[in-house]
Amino acid sequence: MNHVIAPPAATAEQIAESLTEAVHEHRILPDMKLAEDEVGETFGVGRTIVRQALRILAQEGLVTLERNRGAFVSRPSIREAREVFEARALLEPATAHAAATRAAAGDIERLEAHIADEHAALAAGEAGRALSLSGQFHVEIARIADQGTIEGFIRQLVARSSLVIAIYWRRRSALCESHAHHALLDAFRRRDAEEASELMKGHLVDLLSQLDLRDQATPPRSLREALDR
Amino acid sequence: MNHVIAPPAATAEQIAESLTEAVHEHRILPDMKLAEDEVGETFGVGRTIVRQALRILAQEGLVTLERNRGAFVSRPSIREAREVFEARALLEPATAHAAATRAAAGDIERLEAHIADEHAALAAGEAGRALSLSGQFHVEIARIADQGTIEGFIRQLVARSSLVIAIYWRRRSALCESHAHHALLDAFRRRDAEEASELMKGHLVDLLSQLDLRDQATPPRSLREALDR
DNA sequence: GCGGACAGGATCGTATACGATCCGTGCCCA
DNA sequence: TGGGCACGGATCGTATACGATCCTGTCCGC
């Protein structure tokens, strides 16, 4: 199945990014073990590099390192999930505001292409990829806002959101975000910064409301989940 | 066994924290080289650990890794400096708002003690330590707000601010922050969240205005600085 | 006298080896 | 029969060794 990504050795950052992408696409899920040897063989590098990559991901909150046990994909607690969206609520509306002000024609085009890709992926049944692109859309907005530092934070928060969604998403069917992203794009086209900010704020609230953050299932989950895989 | 035990070995996180503290206290300054062997000997560990610590710091933006050249303390660009304070402006007022709402009696006491320490350090002529405590005050507020994720971001931003201050601070004499922190503490005592938010916002603007962010000195600086050490 | 090439030294990049720790399993005993 | 203990395998933690890269100082040719 997993054929070679091996030959041309990779850097720690590249591996971290590959794994992050896999998280975005829900190809790797919370509690999954990332054994150093296994990852190393997959990418054709030694454990030294893998270890560095895992440390990067750990600092971003995507994996949890347990001493003498190994690295596991993080399972965000309910509290953590709320924190992530709390942080996004502080950063992203203002960022969308700035982006709407600064957006050049090329930026708009890129966003359009991005949404088109998202639709194409959905049409092709590539749900994971669609999800990933959907998250990337937010990062793209931060990029347009031209605030590298904040973009980094948002990038991390979006990645962690992918984990949150993997655990707490109510129904995987309805991917109603298309509307929200389209509306945002429209606001960008009109350079309506206030509207963009409000739309982003509402979008995040919507996302959060789609999550099931009652603390019911967590304790049994950690046991059951480990079994049924 | 091991005869040479300076400090009895440390973990990567501990080393990273020690170095961060040194940055806060302006004991290590931008462009300073952090040679792996040197750091390793200092902390009594091998290069493997040091490398991990440096990578942590690199991800936080405190050090810059140059391939085959080594690790250097970052010299934030003017743009970066603005970005850092932009991010703080988004996060900290809202965080202060939340903190003022949640602050328990113990929290207030801790903040009081913190300010007292700061004064004591200043009185003792320990400018570096005073500076460090001054930054830590902001982190402490985030801790009270009980938002771990945001606290992490603020922690990083405060650390990077220390580098910015090291480079761009106008006059090292006037440390007029005492007023601002006192005022914040007062707002916390009164549970006046709105006021706390406004004070924090103003405080950050003040800090930023104390910086000399005209892009005059930077190009010659990077050359001259390297020479006079 | 000056510029370019080359060699030596130092430092980093990566893999690998060895020791430490933990988990699982099977045995033994109560 | 059930619980405790010891052993073995697997995996991680760290140091070290070796190769690669870059910097620097020197030497030679122009």
Image: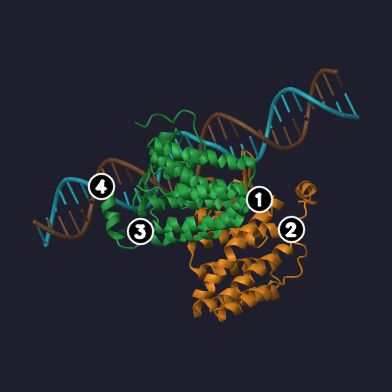
Chain colours: A green, B orange, C cyan, D brown
Subunit ID for the residue under disc 1: B
Residue that carries the numbered disc 4 in the rendered image: A228
Q: Quadrant of residue B29?
A: bottom right
Q: CA distance from mark 1 to mark 2?
A: 14 Å
The disc at residue B74 is 1
Element class at badge 2: helix
Element class at badge 4: loop
Q: Are the two marked residues, 4 and 2, in contact with CB atoms closer than 8 angstroms?
A: no
In terms of depth relative to the viewer, which is nearer, A13 or A159?
A159
Query: Disc 4 marks which amino acid?
Result: Asp
Residue that carries the numbered disc 3 in the rendered image: A212
Q: CA distance from mark 3 to mark 2?
A: 47 Å
Q: CA distance from mark 1 to mark 3?
A: 42 Å
Label 1 in the same subunit as label 3: no
How packed mark 4 is, by other alpha carbons closer than 10 Å (few <14, some 14-19, many 20 or more), is few
Query: Disc 2 marks which amino acid?
Result: Tyr
Query: Disc 3 marks which amino acid?
Result: Asp
Q: CA distance from mark 4 to mark 1?
A: 47 Å
Give the residue drawn at x 41%, y 29%. Answer: A4
Subunit ID for the residue under disc 4: A
In terms of depth relative to the viewer, which is nearer, B4 or D19?
D19
Numbered disc total: 4
> Residue A27: where, in percent of width, then height?
38, 41
Which is closer to the viewer, label 4 or label 1?
A: 4
> Residue B196: where, in percent of width, then height?
59, 74
On screen, residue B159 above or below A6: below
Give the residue drawn at x 75%, y 56%. Answer: B213
Q: Are the two marked residues, 4 and 1, in contact with CB atoms closer than 8 angstroms?
A: no
Query: Disc 1 marks which amino acid?
Result: Ser
Residue that carries the numbered disc 2 in the rendered image: B168
Element class at badge 1: loop
